Image (cartoon, coloured by chain):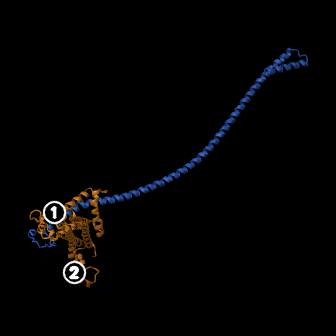
C-alpha cells in the first residue's frame, strides 16, 4: 500500500482519487438519495400539502362564517325594525280599542242608570196608585162612617155640623 | 501515517502539515475500505437518513420541534434552491438537491465536530462523485427535455449569435459544459475543505509545537490556539456556504438544461 511505502519527503497528489473512496462515495450518495426520496421527501410534501389545504380551508371557513354573520345581522336588524313597527301598530290598536271599551262602558252605565231610574219611577207610580186606591177605599169607608155618625147624631144646626166635620177631620188627621 | 510522520519529526523541528496529513491509513489491516473518510461518509448517510426519517415520519400540519428542525432544512432546499432557481417543475429535482445539500453539509461539518474533525469532502474522490452525478443529471435532463440533437446543438451553437462568433464561442461552450462545470464544481468544494482543514492543522499543530518549545514560545502558543478557534468558526461558515453553493450551482445547471434557450 502507498501508506506504508511513503518516504519522508514525498508528497501525495491530493487531486488523485482513491478507488475505494470513489466506490464508497458513489454507493453512499446513491443510498442516501434513494432513502431520502423514498421515505423523507413524500412525507414532507404530504405535510406541506395538508398545511396548504388547512390554510386554504381555514380562510374559506372564515369567509363563510363572516358572510353568515353578516346575513344573520341583516336578518336581526330587519326583524328588529319589523318588531318595532309591529309594536307601534299594536299600541295604536290598543289605544283605539281602550277608547272604544271606555265609550262602550259609559254607554252601558248610562243605560243602566236610565233603566234603574225608570224602574224606580214605575215602582213609585205603582205605590202611588196603590196608595190612591187604598185612600179611596178608606175615604169611602170614612165617608160612610161619617155619614152614619152624622145620621146618628142630630144635625141641628150649622155650627154643630161643622164641628162634627172638623172633629172628623181632626180624627182623620190623627189617625193618619 | 500521521502518527508516523509526527513521531519521525520529533527532534527535527516543526513539520508543517501537508497533503500527506489527509492520507489516513486503513483502520483494519491493509483494507483500503476501512479508512476514516470512508467510515465518515457511511456515518453521514446513517445520520442524515435517521434524522430525516425520524423527523418526517409523523409529519403533520402542526410540526413538532423535531419535525420543524428537519422541515426547515428541507424547505430551505425546496423553496430557496429548487423552486427559486428551477421554477416550474422543480419538484422532481428536490430529492436530488436535498440529498446533495445534506450530504455535503454533514460531511463538511465533520471537519469541526470534536473527535471526528475531518471534512470528508477534503478527499477529492467524494466531490468527484457528486460532480459526476450532477453532470449526468443535468445532461440527462436536457436531453430528455429537448431531445439529444437539439440539446447538444444549442450548447454548441448558441442561438442568436452571429455565425462568425461560433469559431470562438463553440469551443468555449463545449469546454464549459463538458469540462469546466464538473471540474469547478468538484474542485471548488474539495479545495475549500482541503485548505480550511490545512489551515486549522497549521494553527492547532503549530500551537502544540510551540507549547513544547522554550518558555517564550510557550507564551505565544495560546495565540495560535485562539486563531485556531476563530478559524473553526470561520470554517463552519465556509462549510455551510460550500454546501449551499454546490447545490445552488447544481440547481442552476439543471435549470439551464431545462430552459429552451441557454
B178 and B29: which one is in front? B29
Q: Chain of mark 1?
A: B
The picture places residue B239, in percent across and down from the top left corner, at 24, 67
Decide: is A90 above or below A15.
above
Spatial CA span between label 2 and label 1: 41 Å
**In the rendered structure, are the residues bearing label 2 and label 1 in contact, judged by CB atoms less than 8 Å apart?**
no
The image quarter containing residue A157 is top right
Local SS, label 1: helix
The image quarter containing residue B45 is bottom left
B173 and B143: which one is in front? B173
B246 and B37: which one is in front? B37
Whether residue B80 is visible, yes or no, is: yes
Q: Can marks 2 and 1 be said to lie on one chain? A: yes
Of labels 2 and 1, earlier in sequence is 1
Q: Which residue is mark 1?
A: B39
Chain coloured orange: which letter? B
Task: Determine the colour of chain A.
Answer: blue
* Residue at image location 29% in from the left, 64% down from the top: B76
Local SS, label 2: helix
The image quarter containing residue B151 is bottom left
Report whether A98 appears left or right of B144: right
Whether residue B87 is visible, yes or no, is: no
The picture places residue A119, in percent across and down from the top left corner, at 70, 32
The picture places residue A167, in percent across and down from the top left corner, at 84, 19
Amino acid at each position: 500500500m502507498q501508506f506504508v511505502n511513503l518516504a519522508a519527503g514525498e508528497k501525495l497528489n491530493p487531486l488523485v482519487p482513491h478507488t475505494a473512496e470513489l466506490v464508497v462515495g458513489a454507493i453512499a450518495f446513491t443510498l442516501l438519495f434513494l432513502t431520502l426520496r423514498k421515505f423523507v421527501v413524500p412525507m414532507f410534501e404530504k405535510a406541506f400539502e395538508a398545511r396548504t389545504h388547512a390554510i386554504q380551508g381555514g380562510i374559506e371557513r372564515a369567509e363563510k362564517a363572516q358572510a353568515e354573520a353578516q346575513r344573520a345581522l341583516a336578518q336581526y336588524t330587519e326583524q328588529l325594525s319589523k318588531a318595532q313597527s309591529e309594536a307601534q301598530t299594536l299600541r295604536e290598536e290598543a289605544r283605539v280599542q281602550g277608547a272604544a271599551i271606555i265609550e262602550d262602558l259609559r254607554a252601558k252605565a248610562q243605560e243602566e242608570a236610565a233603566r234603574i231610574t225608570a224602574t224606580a219611577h214605575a215602582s213609585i207610580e205603582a205605590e202611588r196608585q196603590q196608595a190612591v186606591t187604598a185612600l179611596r177605599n178608606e175615604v169611602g169607608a170614612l165617608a160612610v162612617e161619617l155619614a152614619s155618625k152624622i145620621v146618628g147624631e142630630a144635625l141641628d144646626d150649622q155650627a154643630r155640623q161643622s164641628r162634627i166635620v172638623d172633629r172628623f177631620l181632626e180624627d182623620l188627621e190623627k189617625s193618619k | 501515517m500521521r502518527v508516523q510522520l509526527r513521531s519521525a519529526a520529533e527532534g527535527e523541528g516543526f513539520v508543517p502539515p501537508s497533503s500527506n496529513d489527509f492520507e489516513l491509513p486503513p483502520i483494519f489491516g491493509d483494507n483500503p475500505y476501512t479508512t476514516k473518510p470512508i467510515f465518515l461518509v457511511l456515518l453521514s448517510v446513517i445520520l442524515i437518513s435517521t434524522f430525516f426519517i425520524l423527523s418526517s415520519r409523523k409529519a403533520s400540519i402542526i410540526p413538532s420541534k423535531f419535525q420543524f428542525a428537519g422541515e426547515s432544512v428541507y424547505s430551505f432546499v425546496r423553496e430557496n434552491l429548487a423552486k427559486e432557481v428551477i421554477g416550474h417543475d422543480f419538484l422532481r429535482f428536490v430529492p436530488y438537491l436535498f440529498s446533495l445539500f445534506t450530504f455535503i453539509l454533514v460531511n463538511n461539518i465533520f471537519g469541526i465536530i470534536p473527535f471526528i474533525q475531518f471534512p470528508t469532502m477534503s478527499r477529492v474522490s467524494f466531490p468527484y462523485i457528486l460532480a459526476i452525478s450532477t453532470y449526468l443529471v443535468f445532461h440527462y435532463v436536457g436531453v430528455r427535455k429537448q431531445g439529444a440533437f437539439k440539446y447538444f446543438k444549442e450548447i454548441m451553437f448558441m442561438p442568436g449569435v452571429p455565425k462568425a462568433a461560433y469559431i470562438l464561442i463553440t469551443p468555449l461552450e463545449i469546454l464549459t459544459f463538458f469540462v469546466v462545470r464538473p471540474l469547478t464544481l468538484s474542485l471548488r468544494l474539495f479545495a475549500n475543505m482541503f485548505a480550511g482543514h490545512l489551515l486549522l492543522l497549521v494553527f492547532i499543530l503549530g500551537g502544540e509545537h510551540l507549547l513544547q518549545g522554550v518558555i517564550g514560545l510557550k507564551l505565544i502558543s495560546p495565540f495560535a490556539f485562539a486563531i485556531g478557534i476563530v478559524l473553526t468558526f470561520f470554517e463552519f461558515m465556509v462549510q455551510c456556504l460550500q454546501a449551499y453553493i454546490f447545490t445552488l450551482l447544481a440547481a442552476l445547471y439543471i435549470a439551464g438544461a431545462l430552459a429552451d434557450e441557454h
